[in-house]
Image: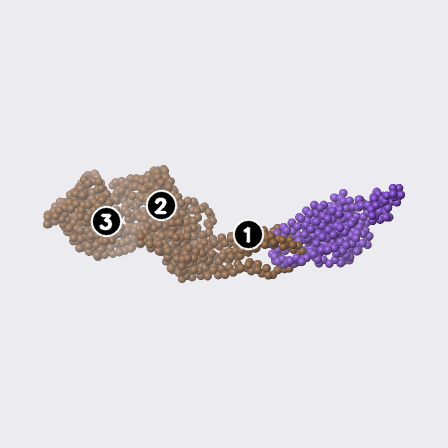
Chain colours: A brown, B purple
C-alpha cells in the first residue's frame, strides 16, 4: 500500500477522471469563439439597440460572467463527481485503479443486544455492514472482525466476493461478552499487514458500534494508554477510521450484577442463602420490578423490587437442596430492552457432606498429641453430639497412606506437620488443585523446608505452595498475630470480635514464608513483626492455604520446651479452621461459575481411556469432546462459552457424572453509558444515525455520499443555468 | 407582376370595394360624393359675399352689387368636392429593411398600402396626391381625381431609391406649408427619427387642419428581436455597427423600442392623429380594412 503523510483531507477514487477538468474551459472558449465568429445582419432600428447597450453594458457583462461561471461550475462538479471524491481522515495517496480494502469491525459487546425497536443494535450493525458492502465499487474487498473479548476475525483474508461475505455477515451472532478494543486494533493491523501488497489504493476501517464507554475507554495502565494511542495513530496513517455510531443516549437498563451465596459450600444438611444484586444503570427509577428465583428451572420465589436510578437493590433467598449433585439457581428479572443481563445463574455443587482428608505427619498414641487431633475436632466440633448431622466429615490418615487414597474423593486435604513429599505425592496434591479442591498445610517441627520448596515449590515442575519456606524463626518471647486490618476474607468473621482470641494467640516458633516478587499469593494473617502467618493462593482451579506454624501442640521447641504455638487450644482455633476450610474449598464453587469467554473444564483422575464429554450449550447445541490423558490426571475443556446461561456437561463412562456450569455476563458491560463522539480519539470520523425505524439506511460510504452531493449540485446548477439564461434573455420570442 | 397589379392586389381591392372612406372631420366642399366641406368653391350654389381684397380674381366680382352699392364684393359658392388625400411615403434607407421572416421590406409593404389607397380614392372620384421623402422631399405629385393619375403615382413609387437618412420633422413642417388644400394626410413610415422633431412636424400639419393618419410600418424582427447567436448589426442610415449577444440584450432592446412606440403613440393621440401599427408579416387587407372600418365608425 502506498502511504503518504497525513495531510490530505480530501481524495478521489478515480484520479484520471480529473483530467476532464480541462473541459471546464469549454464555456469560456465557446464564449470567445462566439465573439470571433458571428453573423452579420443589416439593422434599421440600430438607434434603440445602441441605447439598450449604453444602459445595460455593465449588467450584460455581469450576466455573461455569471452564466459563464455557472456553466464552468457545472462541468467542474460533474467531473469531480465522476472522479469519486471522498473525505479523507488520514493521508493516503491513491493509485489509479481505486480499489478499496474495507475492514468492517462489528462491536460484539453484549450491550449491542439493546433492542430499542424490533431490531437490536447488533442487527442494525449487520444491516449497515451489508449496505457498506452493497454500495462498494467493483474490485473492493472486505474483511470482517467481531470486536469481542477476545476479538474474532471472521474474514481475515480480504474477500472480493460480496455474496460470500454477506453470508458470513448473516451468520454472525452476538456473543454475551465484552469488547476488547486494543486487541481488536491489533487484529485489524494484522489484516492490513496481510493485505498490504494487494494493490489497494486505500483502506477504510468501519467500526459499527454503540460507543459504549467501557469499550472505547479501555482501562489501561499508563504505558498501555500510550501504546493504545500510538497504535491508533499508526492505524490512522494506513486507513480511514470511521465510527458508525448505533447507540442511543439515555438508554435505560436494569441488570443482575451478582448472585452469590454466603456459604462456601452447600450440603443437603442445611439451607443455602443466596443474595442477588440488581443494579439500575439508567436515569429513571424502576419501581415494582419483577424478580424471580428459579432452581433447576423451577420458579421458587417471586418478588418485586424498587431500584432507584443509578443504584442497586438486594434480593435474597434461602433454599435447601434435597439431593446432592449440581443444581442451578437462576435470578431472572422482568423484561427490559437489554435482555442478556436480565438473568444470572449460579451452579451449586451440593454434597451430602464435605469430605476432608487430614494427613497426620506426626502421629501420637497420646490423645490430643498428634498433628491432626485438634484439627479433626475443629473441623467437626459437633461430632460427638447425638442427633446432629455433620456437614464436614474429616478422615485422618498417616502420611504414608497418602498415595493409597484417591484424593478425588475429598474436597479438601489438610497436611499437618508432614515432613516431606515425594514427587508422586506432589503430583497427586497438584491434581487436587487442578480439579478445584483445597489444600491446607500446617507446618511444624517435622517439616523439611528445602524438600517442600523442591517438590512443592515449583523447582521440580509441581507448584502447590503459595510461598517458599524460609528459615524457622524461634522467638524466646511469643508473638501475636496481626490481622492486617481484617482485609482478607478469611478474617472477616473476626472483625469486631476481639474476644475470639485470635489476636492474643501466642506463637513461639514458625517458618518464615517468603513470597515471590510477582506472586499472586495473598497474606491473610501476619505476625506482629510483619512476617506472613497464613498465605493463600488460587492455584489451578483450587486453592492452597499455607499456615506458617503448627496446627497442633505436637511441635515443641526443644530449646525452650514451649510448643510452637498454643493456637489449637485457643478459642479462635475452631473458627479459623472453619474459615480456612471454607476458603480452601471455595474454588469448587467458583470453578462451575464462570464468565462469558472463560473455559469450562476440570481435572479428573488419570484414566486409561479417553472418555467422552458431551457439552450442551444454552442454545441447545451439543458438542462432544474427548478427555486429554496425562500421566497424572485427565482433563477436558470447552472454550466456546460466548453465550451466557447453563452449560450441561455429561461425563460419559467411566466417569459417569453430570455437571452444570453457569456462565454469566460481565456486569460492567451492562452500563450503557456512551462515550460522546467528540471524546473519541481524533483519528476517528464519526457517522451517526439516530433513527432506528428507517428501513433504508442512509449511505455512509463517504465516496458515494459526496458523489451524490455533487450530482445534486450539478442538477441544481443546470436548473440555475436555465433560469438565468431565461431571465437574462427576456421573454420568449 | 405588372406594376399596377403589384400594388393593387385584387384581393385587397375586393375587400375594400364596399367600404366608404370618409373623412373624420370637415373637408372643404361637396363636389361629389357625400363629403361635406366648409371650403368655398366656385360651382353649383351661391353661399355669401365677401369684400374684395387686392389680388382677388376679378372673374368672381358680383357686378350687380357693385352697381347698387358702389362697393366691390366677390361671390362665394358652396360646393360639393372630392376628398383630397396626400400619401406621404417614407423612402429612407431604413425602410429597405427586410428580415428573414418578413414577406417583403417595409418600403414594399408601404408601397402596397399606398397603391391600394390611391386606387380606392380614385375609384371614389376623390383626389389623391403623393409625396416621397427621406431627409428631403424627393417627389411631390399634386392631388388629382383623374383615374389615369394612378399610373403616375405607381410610377413614382416604382422608381423610388431608398438610400438616405430620414428627417421627418423638417419634412412635415415643409409639407404643412406647401399642402394648401386641407385634406387627409396619410403617412407611411417606420418613423425611425427624432420623435420630438417628428411630433412637432405632425403638430404643424394638424395646425393646418389636415386630418392625419400615421401607418407605422415595422418589420416583425424589429418588434420581436428574435436573434440568438452573436450578431454584428450593420447600422443603416449612417448609424454605427453593433456587435453583441442578442439574447443578453433582447430585454433591454425591447424596452427601448417599446418606449419609442409608446412615445409615438402618445404623441399621435395628443394631436388627434390616427396611429396604426403595421407589421410587414400581417396581410395587407387585414391591416387596411381593420383601419378603415375603425375610421368609418369614428366618422359616423
What residue appears at the point 40 percent right and 59 percent down from the top-left corner?
A5
- Quarter-of-image position of residue B228: bottom right
Residue A311: mark = none
Q: Nearer the viewer, residue A244 or A466?
A: A244
Sequence order check: which comes first, mark 1 or mark 3?
3
Sequence order check: which comes first, mark 2 or mark 3?
3
Label 1 close to label 3 by CB (< 8 Å): no
Label 1: how many Cα within 10 Å (few below 14, some 14–19, many 20+): some
Position in image of residue A34 (x %, y %):
59, 59
SS assignment at label 3: strand
Position in image of residue A397 (x %, y %):
18, 49
Query: Which quarter shows the N terminus of chain A?
Result: bottom left
Q: Distance between the Cα atoms at labels 1 and 3?
A: 79 Å
Residue A565 can be seen in this image: no
Q: Which residue is mark 2?
A: A671
What residue appears at the point 70 percent right and 49 percent down from the top-left corner?
B200
Is the residue at mark 2 from the same chain as the one at mark 1?
A: yes
Image side of residue A596 versus residue A539, left or right: right
Q: Callout 1: residue from which chain?
A: A
Q: Which residue is mark 1?
A: A720
Q: Callout 2: residue from which chain?
A: A
What residue appears at the point 69 percent right and 47 percent down from the top-left corner?
B267
What residue appears at the point 31 percent right and 43 percent down from the top-left corner?
A259
SS assignment at label 1: helix
Amino acid at each position: 500500500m502506498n502511504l503518504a503523510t497525513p495531510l490530505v483531507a480530501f481524495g478521489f477514487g478515480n484520479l484520471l477522471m480529473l483530467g476532464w477538468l480541462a473541459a471546464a474551459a469549454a464555456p469560456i472558449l465557446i464564449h470567445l469563439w462566439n465573439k470571433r465568429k458571428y453573423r452579420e445582419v443589416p439593422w434599421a432600428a440600430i438607434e434603440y439597440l445602441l441605447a439598450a447597450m449604453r444602459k445595460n453594458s455593465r449588467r450584460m457583462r455581469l450576466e455573461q460572467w455569471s452564466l459563464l461561471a455557472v456553466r464552468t461550475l457545472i462541468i467542474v462538479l460533474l467531473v469531480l463527481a465522476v472522479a469519486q471524491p471522498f473525505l479523507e481522515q488520514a493521508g493516503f495517496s491513491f493509485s489509479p485503479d481505486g480499489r478499496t480494502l474495507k475492514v468492517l469491525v462489528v462491536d460484539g459487546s453484549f450491550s449491542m443486544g439493546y433492542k430499542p425497536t424490533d431490531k437490536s443494535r447488533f442487527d442494525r450493525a449487520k444491516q449497515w455492514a451489508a449496505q457498506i458492502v452493497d454500495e462498494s465499487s467493483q474490485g473492493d474487498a472486505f474483511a470482517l472482525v467481531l470486536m469481542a473479548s477476545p476479538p474474532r476475525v471472521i474474514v481475515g483474508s480480504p474477500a472480493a466476493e460480496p455474496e460470500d461475505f454477506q453470508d458470513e455477515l448473516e451468520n454472525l451472532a452476538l456473543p454475551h461478552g465484552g469488547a476488547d478494543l486494543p486487541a481488536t486494533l491489533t487484529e485489524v493491523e494484522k489484516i492490513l499487514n496481510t493485505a498490504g501488497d494487494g494493490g489497494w489504493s486505500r483502506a477504510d476501517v468501519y467500526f459499527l458500534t454503540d460507543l459504549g464507554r467501557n469499550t472505547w475507554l479501555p482501562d489501561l495502565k499508563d504505558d498501555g494508554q500510550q501504546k493504545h494511542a500510538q497504535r491508533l495513530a499508526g492505524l490512522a496513517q494506513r486507513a480511514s477510521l470511521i465510527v458508525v455510531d448505533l447507540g442511543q443516549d439515555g438508554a435505560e437498563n436494569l441488570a443482575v450484577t451478582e448472585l452469590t451465596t454466603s456459604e462456601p459450600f452447600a450440603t443437603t444438611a442445611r439451607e443455602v442463602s443466596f443474595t442477588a444484586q440488581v443494579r439500575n444503570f439508567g436515569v429513571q427509577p424502576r419501581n415494582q420490578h419483577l424478580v424471580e428465583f428459579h432452581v433447576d428451572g423451577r420458579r421458587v420465589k417471586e418478588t418485586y423490587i424498587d431500584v432507584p436510578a443509578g443504584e442497586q437493590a438486594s434480593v435474597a433467598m434461602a433454599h435447601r437442596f434435597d439431593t446432592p449433585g449440581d443444581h442451578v439457581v437462576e435470578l431472572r428479572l422482568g423484561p427490559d430492552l437489554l435482555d442478556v443481563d436480565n438473568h444470572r445463574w449460579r451452579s451449586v455443587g451440593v454434597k451430602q457432606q464435605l469430605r476432608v482428608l487430614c494427613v497426620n505427619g506426626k502421629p501420637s498414641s497420646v490423645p490430643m498429641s498428634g498433628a491432626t487431633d485438634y484439627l479433626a475436632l475443629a473441623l467437626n466440633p459437633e461430632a460427638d453430639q447425638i442427633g446432629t448431622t455433620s456437614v464436614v466429615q474429616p478422615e485422618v490418615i498417616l502420611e504414608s497412606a497418602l498415595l493409597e487414597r484417591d484424593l478425588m474423593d475429598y474436597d479438601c486435604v489438610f497436611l499437618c506437620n508432614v515432613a516431606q513429599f515425594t514427587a508422586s505425592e506432589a503430583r497427586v496434591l497438584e491434581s487436587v488443585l487442578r480439579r478445584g479442591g483445597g489444600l491446607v498445610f500446617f507446618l511444624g517441627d517435622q517439616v523439611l523446608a528445602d524438600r517442600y520448596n523442591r517438590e512443592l515449590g515449583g523447582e521440580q515442575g509441581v507448584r502447590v505452595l503459595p510461598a517458599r519456606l524460609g528459615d524457622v524463626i524461634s522467638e524466646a518471647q511469643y508473638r501475636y498475630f496481626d490481622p492486617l486490618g481484617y482485609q482478607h476474607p478469611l478474617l472477616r468473621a473476626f472483625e469486631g470480635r476481639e474476644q475470639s482470641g485470635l489476636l492474643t494467640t501466642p506463637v513461639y516458633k514458625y517458618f518464615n514464608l517468603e513470597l515471590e516478587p510477582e506472586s499472586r499469593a495473598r497474606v491473610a494473617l501476619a505476625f506482629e513483626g510483619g512476617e506472613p502467618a497464613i498465605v493463600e493462593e488460587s492455584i489451578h482451579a483450587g486453592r492452597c492455604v499455607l499456615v506458617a506454624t503448627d496446627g497442633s501442640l505436637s511441635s515443641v521447641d526443644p530449646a525452650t520446651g514451649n510448643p510452637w504455638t498454643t493456637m489449637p487450644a485457643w478459642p479462635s482455633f475452631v473458627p479459623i479452621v472453619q474459615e480456612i476450610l471454607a476458603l480452601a474449598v471455595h474454588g469448587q464453587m467458583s470453578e462451575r461459575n464462570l464468565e462469558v469467554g472463560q473455559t469450562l473444564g476440570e481435572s479428573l483422575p488419570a484414566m486409561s481411556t479417553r472418555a467422552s464429554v458431551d457439552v450442551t450449550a444454552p442454545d441447545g447445541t451439543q458438542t462432544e469432546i474427548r478427555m486429554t490423558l496425562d500421566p497424572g490426571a485427565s482433563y477436558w475443556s470447552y472454550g466456546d462459552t460466548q453465550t451466557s446461561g447453563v452449560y450441561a456437561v455429561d461425563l460419559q463412562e467411566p466417569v459417569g457424572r453430570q455437571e452444570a456450569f453457569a456462565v454469566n455476563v460481565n456486569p460492567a458491560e451492562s452500563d450503557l453509558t456512551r462515550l460522546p463522539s467528540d471524546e473519541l480519539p481524533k483519528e476517528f470520523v464519526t457517522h451517526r444515525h439516530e433513527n432506528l425505524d428507517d428501513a433504508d439506511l442512509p449511505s455512509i460510504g463517504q465516496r458515494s455520499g459526496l458523489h451524490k452531493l455533487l450530482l445534486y449540485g450539478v442538477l441544481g446548477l443546470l436548473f440555475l443555468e436555465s433560469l438565468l439564461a431565461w431571465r437574462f434573455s427576456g421573454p420568449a420570442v | 407582376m405588372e406594376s399596377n397589379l403589384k400594388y393593387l392586389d385584387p384581393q385587397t381591392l375586393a375587400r375594400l370595394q364596399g367600404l366608404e372612406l370618409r373623412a373624420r372631420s370637415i373637408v372643404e366642399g361637396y363636389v361629389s360624393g357625400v363629403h361635406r366641406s366648409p371650403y368655398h368653391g366656385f360651382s353649383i350654389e351661391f353661399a355669401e359675399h365677401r369684400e374684395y381684397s387686392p389680388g382677388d380674381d376679378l372673374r368672381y366680382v358680383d357686378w350687380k352689387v357693385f352697381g347698387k352699392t358702389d362697393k366691390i364684393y366677390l361671390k362665394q359658392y358652396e360646393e360639393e368636392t372630392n376628398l383630397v388625400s396626400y400619401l406621404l411615403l417614407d423612402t429612407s434607407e431604413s425602410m429597405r429593411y427586410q428580415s428573414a421572416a418578413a414577406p417583403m421590406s417595409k418600403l414594399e409593404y408601404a408601397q402596397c398600402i399606398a397603391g391600394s389607397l390611391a386606387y380606392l380614392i380614385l375609384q371614389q372620384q376623390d383626389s389623391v396626391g403623393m409625396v416621397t421623402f427621406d431627409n428631403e422631399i424627393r417627389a411631390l405629385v399634386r392631388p388629382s381625381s383623374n383615374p389615369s393619375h394612378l399610373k403616375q403615382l405607381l410610377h413614382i413609387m416604382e422608381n423610388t431609391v431608398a438610400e438616405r437618412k430620414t428627417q421627418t420633422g423638417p419634412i412635415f413642417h415643409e409639407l404643412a406649408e406647401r399642402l394648401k388644400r386641407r385634406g387627409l394626410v396619410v403617412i407611411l413610415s417606420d418613423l425611425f427619427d427624432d420623435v420630438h422633431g417628428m411630433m412637432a412636424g405632425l403638430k404643424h400639419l394638424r395646425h393646418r387642419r389636415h386630418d392625419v393618419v400615421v401607418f407605422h410600418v415595422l418589420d416583425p424582427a424589429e418588434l420581436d428581436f428574435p436573434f440568438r447567436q452573436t450578431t454584428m448589426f450593420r447600422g443603416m442610415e449612417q448609424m454605427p455597427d453593433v456587435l453583441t449577444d442578442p439574447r443578453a440584450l433582447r430585454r433591454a432592446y425591447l424596452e427601448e423600442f417599446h418606449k419609442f412606440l409608446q412615445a409615438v403613440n402618445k404623441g399621435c393621440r395628443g394631436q388627434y392623429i390616427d396611429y396604426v401599427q403595421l407589421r410587414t408579416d400581417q396581410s395587407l387587407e387585414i391591416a387596411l380594412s381593420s383601419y378603415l372600418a375603425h375610421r368609418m365608425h369614428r366618422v359616423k
